[in-house]
Image (tube, rainbow, N blue to C red):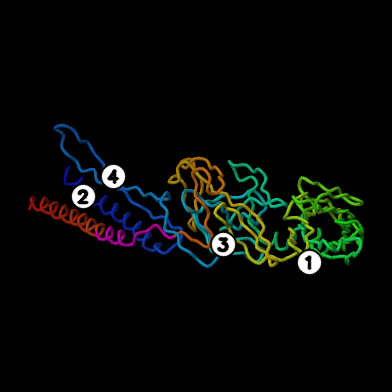
Amino acid sequence: MSISSSLAAGVSGLNANAQRLSTISDNIANSATYGYKRMSTDFHSMVVGEGNGARYTAGGVRTSQLREIQETGQLQNTSNSTDIAINGRGFLPVTTLESAESGGNLDLLLATTGSFRANDEGILVDGAGKVLLGWPAGPNGEFPAFPRDGVGGLEPINVFHNQYTASPTSEVTVSANLPSDASDPANLGEPQNLNVEYFGNLGQTESLDFTFTPTGTINEWELQIYDSNSDSIVGDYTLSFSDANAGGGMLENVVANAGGAYDPATGTIELAVGGGTIMAKIGGLGDPSGMTQLDSNFAPTQLSKNGAAAGSLRSVEIDGNGIVHGIYETGQIRPIYQVPVIDVPNPVGLVSTDGQSYRVSPDSGTIFLWDAGAGPVGTTEGFTREASTVDVAKELTDLIQTQRAYSSNAKIIQTVDEMLQETMNLKR
């Protein structure tokens, strides 16, 4: 009977608008929740026995809910270096704290933003208990090739694993001007000294002493290099300088009396110091930026080294390529982890979980781990969080529409009830 179907249609309308009210309420409640993706409700008509000449029966309405995971919220700056958001497509790899501490297979979850801080074990975890995952860097700051289609190689980012670091010196640059009149055999000058600090394998501070002594031959000097670590002379060289019109005062020849050979192509000598090898660059032959002998005073022109002393971790930051850098008190900046950005073919097919995180499902498709900023995925932004995608003004407008639609469906039920009452009154 059509009047009965009208009653059923009215009831389905009440249920449908109640469902829409639930999503609107959830959206408004989470309008200030970072990383929240709004829910939408779609209405679908239901048809019962419709056809040419057939009596029409009201089918009513049903609803479906969808989380709009593909939408991105506005990026907002923060003061925490480990507040992270994706600028563009993609997800951060995270897991639960329980999974991270279990030592077994990681329970992979996806998130678009998070406010991570080190807990008492050094693990970067957010307020919802989600742990940030990444690939660990090798001893020299390089990243090996990890699987891109699974979680193999990913581990919880633990800043305590990189609490202290040291980088031994492998290169020093030494150049100076030697006074030309000091090499005159008739009036030999005094030896000249340069001290260059370097860092050993354990982060300790050592030094190389460069002593330049006139040999008694015009335009010729002896260079002796003393290493404080091994307490020995690690190099002895004879330096000859040109006095020609072209290239006068430039280095003309280097003879190795002891120690590593001089390479004129690179202008370096190899020094075997305590605990390792250092390449000392004194300049190539005829190189005005290297060692010179001009009519002037003794003056160092360049003293530099690489490496760093032992130092403790001061802070961590993430760059646009997903590289987590450790910043140490010595000023050294060292890559310690790489956070990949995960992409799936159908983000809307992900299953929502607590704390603005998602789980892969058959509808979402399989994961692929990209370097941040490569392929279809966006960059990683530190000091940043992604705001909720909820538009409060739109939700309030939808709330008014839902209220009116609910009232209208209630009116249908009231009207059908009155009509049925009239039908019952016909018997009297």
Residue 177, located in which quarter of the rendered image? Answer: bottom right
Residue depicted at 55% across the width and 42% down the height: 368
Q: Are marks 1 and 2 in contact (CB under 8 Å)?
A: no
Indicate which disc, 1 or 2, sits on the residue closer to the N terminus: 2
Disc 1: which residue: 297
Percent x, y of residue 425: 9, 53
Observer-side mark, 2 or 3, equals: 3
Disc 3: which residue: 82
Dominant secondary structure of the residues highlighted in magenta in the image? helix
Disc 2: which residue: 7
Magenta stretch: includes residue 311: no
Percent x, y of residue 131: 59, 57
Q: CA distance from mark 4 to mark 2?
A: 18 Å
Indicate which disc, 1 or 4, sits on the residue closer to the N terminus: 4
Badge 1 amino acid: Asn
Badge 3 amino acid: Thr
Magenta stretch: includes residue 388: yes
Badge 4 amino acid: His
Q: Are marks 3 and 4 in contact (CB under 8 Å)?
A: no
Q: CA distance from mark 1 to mark 3?
A: 52 Å
Left or right position of 115 against 213: left
**Magenta span of residues:** 387-400
